[in-house]
Each structure stands twice: as C-alpha cells, then as structure tokens.
Image (cartoon, rainbow, N blue to C red):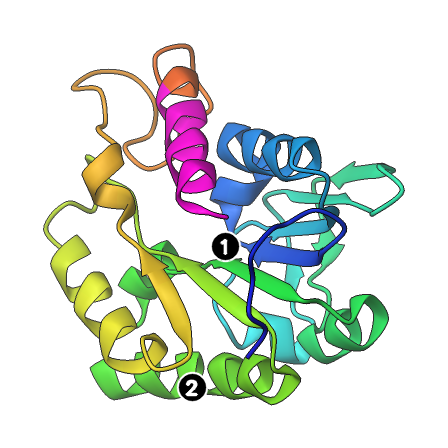
Amino acid sequence: MVMLTTLVSASVLVFGDSHLVGPFGQALDRGLREKQAVVATYGSCGSIGKWWITGKSTNCGYFERSPANVERRSATHATPKLDDLLRRHKPDVVIVNLSTNYVNVPSDEAVRSDLRVLVEKIRATGARCFWLGPPKMRRFEAESPRLERLLREVVTPVCDIFDSRAVTSYPAQGGDGVHFGFPAGIPIARAWASAFLASLP
C-alpha cells in the first residue's frame, strides 16, 4: 500500500454512483484538483460493483472528468471497466463512492461478493484506498445501517471507510430522498465533499 503523505502530483482515481454524477462529485473532483492531485473521476448512476466489472450501461446519468480536466456528461453511457481504469491511470490513490444502490440487493452475501471483487482488484494495485460510506438519505434511512455494516465487513481490511452519515443530513422536504441535486441539497453535498477532503493528507 502507498504511504500517502500528500496528494500533490499523486494519481487519483475516483469512481462511483449517482452521488458522483451530482453536486457531491463536482465538489470532490474540484477539491482534489485544488490539492494538486492528478485526478480522473467517473460516475455512473445506478451502479454497484459488478457494473464496473461488466461495463453495464447507465440510463440515468454519467459523468467523467479526465486528468486533463476534459468533462463528459450524458444520460446514457457504458460504465467504464475498473480493470481498464486501473491500467490507464495507474493510481496511487483510489476513492470509491459505492453503497447506496445495494439497497436493491436483498442478499447480504450477494453484496459482500460484489464488494470483494472490487476490493481485491484495488488491493492488487497497492494503491491507497478510501471508500465513502452512504450519506444520510430520507428515503433509505432504515437501510443505511445494513449498508454501513456490509461495507465495514468487506472493505475495511483494504480501504479506509469515511463515515458520510456523520457529516450529512437530508432535508425533510424536497428532492427525491436520495440525491442532493436540488437547492436545499446542494450545500449539503458540498459540505460532505469538504469534510471528506479535510480528512485526506
């Protein structure tokens, strides 16, 4: 594992679900670049781990920003394959924002198995890994403890887990109960990103 003392000039790969497509992802990507990291960010709405293995397409939003700061957005797009991203970017640091969509996977063991595949691929690179746990969400609040538990069971040996619930809230009104891309949610998403960035070297 990389001994990370600073992000300056470090190659950082960021990938995850719809939270990365929205204002949280924008703020996180911007903040990493301000730390002078060499950043590649990819967000695929609706994704879980296996999408990043098989290249399954999203139909609810895709975002990417290259190390050269070239942005691509589309409603539909194939999810990039993690093997390709690791080979292309050779990251010193990997940041993962995947957890929310596991509410749609009822079997705990299926979730564990899905997470293990990603974790082992990241482990094999020797990169330093950070994994963002689920934020507070009005719609999935009851499921959040399960998501957090499964993440900690599988991910902890390889990745540092950031407790997103400790630094987020969700308005009682507005939005869809999950995403932060509405007027009252955007400041919360940006504060979430800032709190995570503050936890990094």
Horizontal and vertical percent for residue 15?
A: 60, 57
Residue on which the image places disc 1:
46
Horizontal and vertical percent for residue 110?
A: 32, 85
Residue on which the image places disc 2:
116
In front of the other: 104 or 85:
85
In front of the other: 98 or 177:
98
Which quadrant of the view contains residue 108?
Answer: bottom left
Q: Which residues are magenta?
A: 188-201
Horizontal and vertical percent for residue 128?
A: 54, 69
| Mark 2 to mark 1 CA distance (whole Å) | 19 Å
Residue at point 76%, 50% (across, down) = 9
Secondary structure under tag 1 reads loop
In front of the other: 16 or 66:
66
Mark 2 burial class by Cα count in 10 Å: few <14, some 14-19, many 20+ = some
Residue at point 59%, 73% (across, down) = 2
Residue at point 73%, 74% (across, down) = 86
Mark 1 burial class by Cα count in 10 Å: few <14, some 14-19, many 20+ = many
Q: Main secondary structure of the magenta part?
A: helix
Residue at point 47%, 39% (across, down) = 197
Side of 125 relative to 156 (left or right): right
Which quadrant of the view contains residue 135?
Answer: top left
* Amino acid at pointer 2: Arg
Horizontal and vertical percent for residue 125?
A: 65, 83
